Image: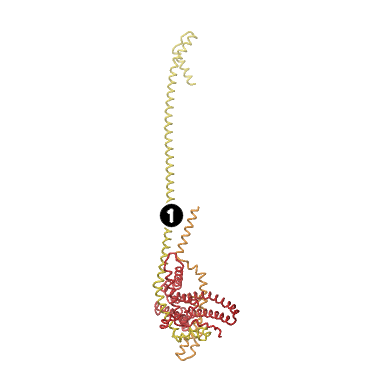
Chain colours: A red, B yellow, C orange
Amino acid sequence: MAGPTIDALGQFTLTTGLGGLGRAVNFTNSNEAMLGAAVVVVLVFALGLRSRALVPGRTQSLVELLYEFVRNMCVDTIGEEGLRFFPLVFTIFSFILLGNLIGLFPYFFAFTSHIAVTLTLALFVFVFSTGVGFYTHGFKFLKFFVPSGVPSWLLPLLVPIEIISYLSRPVSLSVRLFANMTAGHVMWEVFAGFMLLLTASFGVLGAFASVVPLGLNVALAALELLVAGLQAYVFAILTCLYLHDAVHMH
Amino acid sequence: MRRVSTALLLALAPSAALAEGTMPQMDFANPLTLDQVGWMAVILVVLYLLLSRWGLPEIGKVLEHRAGVIAKDLAAARAAKVEADQAVAQLNATIAQARAAAQAEVAKAVADAKADAAAKAAALASQLEAKLAESEARIDAARAAALAAIKPVAAEAASSILLKLTGSQPAEDKLAQRLDDALAARKAA
Amino acid sequence: MSEGRDKAAFEQRLKAAEQAAEGPKRDAAESDAGSARRAIELAMRLGVEMVAAMVIAVVIGWGLDKLFHTTPWLMILMVPVGMVAGLRNLLRASGDKTGG
């Protein structure tokens, strides 16, 4: 009898979802989670908007809180012009937040732990903010890479540094989210695997001993909840920061 | 692009080393890895349209409406307060005015009464004065009359006394002279 | 006596309500919760910022090497540049708006 092995990475394996239809159009299990996240966002909005009460109920308060949180983030970081990007930032923030949260549930796919997903999001933010920069300032936006107030002989050295620094943005943005989510899920899986291993190897005694990894997992769950919110927040605020740079060039 | 990102990822993630290249996230040979991104784009576009066209503006409207109601209520409270303050000030002014008017009235009444009393007193005094003067005049007249009436009586009494004492009739003019002197002396006394 | 106190209390409450309606004061909140939030945010960013710049620099060097057939010299050359760019990222992240 082969004992259970720890397969910490199997949870990230992509399959097709939604049965035959999904197989036909390559709709993956991660897309199911994305759809779930989007549906939850829309549902929460629909529920929150049902009564439109002057004194809000619980769901309405939640939606209003999210609205004002992201709105203040946009205005504080980008400035008054930030309101133009508010729907975009809100969409990204809510999508990532719900994706992170949904991924915390057992059997639910954490799509933010896929680098292809986070890199696409980050590249979109990168290309979009760069586009905003050129749209707002024209070719003067290139001056963003020329630091002001340095002797000109240093520029051949500094401009590549600035460009590399700028190009590293989508990488750091995507890797941060991907690494945080992946690490949390891997650790969960590893601890859970320990429990199975202990039980399989030492029987009843092992089952008792597996209280330790179980406790670790419980503590980890709390941490992951924090990380899920924090990473969504960091992604959104960096999006705002990049947009601020594009609009104000500093 | 794809090759760059693959190289990048392999170079990047220390966890990739841990997974010994079996991370499903790095499995770009699997078409699903990139296909999920396409579907994500579709889902995100729909979510963005729903939120930007419907969800966020509606919430914005709710919040705006609430802010409007609060502002209106506060303005009403402010106005009511100003109004109340004004009413209080007006009331105070009216009270002060009424008090001043009443005081003036009282002062006037007192002055009137005083003048009236003074006039009455003056009239009474003059009346009394007149009566006094009249009485004095009457007394004087009575005295004069009495004095005038005394002279013949005195003369007759004196002549009869002298007659009895001396047995001779005194001289008429000498007696009158002496009587006048005596009367004058009496009067002077 | 008590009327005057009531009036003052009403005035105070009205002022407080008006201020609350205008929105919370940002500056006051920023000092405490804001700095803690920024510290966490920064901690989350530092390591990755450093590595990301490095990776981009190396990938560019690697690409240029392929282009000019100079393997591996440009890639090696780009390593210090990437390190400096990573430091630049850190500076920008910690100084935020002053870093430009």
Residue at the outermost top position: B167
**Measured from the top left, where is residue B62 in percent x and y?**
41, 67
Quadrant in the picture for residue B51: bottom left
Residue of label 1: B84
Mark 1: secondary structure: helix
Image side of residue B117 versus residue C47, left or right:
left
How many circles with numbers are drawn on the protein? 1
Is residue A58 visible in the rendered structure shown here?
A: yes
Taking depth in this image into account, of A222 and B155 the one nearest to the observer is A222
Is residue A152 visible in the rendered structure shown here?
A: no
The chain to which mark 1 is attached is B
**Measured from the top left, where is residue A222 in percent x and y?**
53, 74
Taking depth in this image into account, of A124 and B27 the one nearest to the observer is B27
**Measured from the top left, where is residue A27 in percent x and y?**
42, 81
Residue type at mark 1 is Ala
Residue at the outermost right position: A205
**Measured from the top left, where is residue B41 in percent x and y?**
41, 79
Image side of residue A240 versus residue A214, left or right:
left
Residue at the outermost front position: A1
Taking depth in this image into account, of B85 and A237 the one nearest to the observer is A237
Identify the residue shown where x is 48% and y is 8%: B167
Instruction: Look at the picture and state if B136 lies above or below A183.
Output: above
Identify the residue shown where x is 39% and y is 71%: B54
Q: How many other residues sit within 10 Å of disc 1, few (<14), some (14-19) or many (≥20)?
A: few
